[in-house]
Image (spheres, grey):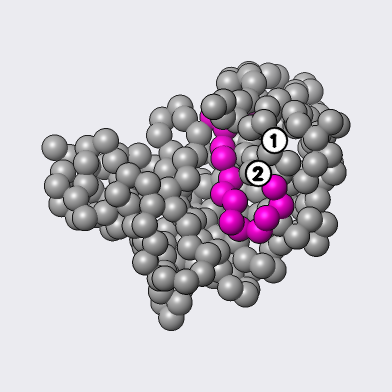
Amino acid sequence: GAGVSQTPSNKVTEKGKYVELRCDPISGHTALYWYRQSLGQGPEFLIYFQGTGAADDSGLPNDRFFAVRPEGSVSTLKIQRTERGDSAVYLCASSPEAGGPLFEQYFGPGTRLTVT
Amino acid sequence: AQSVAQPEDQVNVAEGNPLTVKCTYSVSGNPYLFWYVQYPNRGLQFLLKYITGDNLVKGSYGFEAEFNKSQTSFHLKKPSALVSDSALYFCAVTSPLLLSSFSGGYNKLIFGAGTRLAVHP
């Protein structure tokens, strides 16, 4: 079956611009996560959705970052006034439901964001 | 604070030899531990997890990992390495104290920095 998909695969933008990154989770998965992976580092948690609601957004670095999931499926990560330090690979993951650690997270291929 | 340490940036092993990729963790409460693998230009793929029960966990592609509570470790192992095992490996942890009160489901994985495994023919 189809896995988690993310678009675009690569995004180059100028400093100060606004960007949107899209995630399509596996069909039927209610839990959705965003992570950020900087070069040479492991993924860092950004935000977690259970259904349409953001259950935990404690990982968002500042108020330039915002994410939505209006219908409980597709999610969009939005970054305003991009800075060069925002350059990273943004990963999306989904899992079947809120069932505790029994359900592993399935990751998408990521969007590589480069801010020039 | 919750954290994961992968002390080796790179592990080199000859094909056919056993391999070990090390991971230690620090977490409040009981740990739930995971290993993921990342191939170039592909997403993280789940290998195995420890939740409770038997300390030796078997996963995909012949990998296994041993949970050692006293040493707070969860090392990844394989008896006989393949060239195709060459990739970036990440250890991750979460715990009941990181669960969201909103949903009751775990939500926040804490990852190590990764270890690059190079298997030579």
Magenta stretch: includes residue A72 = no
Q: Which mark is residue A108?
A: none
Pinpoint residue A54: horizontal percent, then vertical percent: 82, 45
Give SS at disc 2: loop
Q: Which mark is residue A96?
A: 2
Q: Quadrant of residue A70?
A: top right
Give SS at disc 1: loop
Query: How would you rate the neighbour count of disc 2 (Cα within 10 Å): few for under 14, some for 14-19, many for 20 or more?
Result: some
For disc 2, the chain is A
Taking the image as shown, residue B68 lies to the left or right of residue B3, namely left
Which amino acid does the dot numbered 2 rest on? Pro
- Along the polypeptide, which appears first: circle 1 or circle 2? 1
Query: How would you rate the neighbour count of disc 1 (Cα within 10 Å): few for under 14, some for 14-19, many for 20 or more?
Result: few
Of residues B55 and A63, the one nearer the viewer is B55
Which amino acid does the dot numbered 1 rest on? Gly
The residue most toward the bottom is B70
Q: Which residues are magenta?
A: A97-113
At x 71% / y 31%, what residue is drawn?
A83
Taking the image as shown, residue B100 lies to the left or right of residue B26, namely right
Of residues A43 and A31, the one nearer the viewer is A31
For disc 1, the chain is A
Taking the image as shown, residue A100 lies to the left or right of residue B92, namely right
Q: Which mark is residue A28?
A: 1
Q: Is residue B108 above or below residue A47?
A: below
At x 35% / y 39%, what residue is drawn?
B87
Pinpoint residue B72: horizontal percent, then vertical percent: 46, 73
Are the residues flagged by discs 1 and 2 in contact, CB closer than 8 Å?
yes
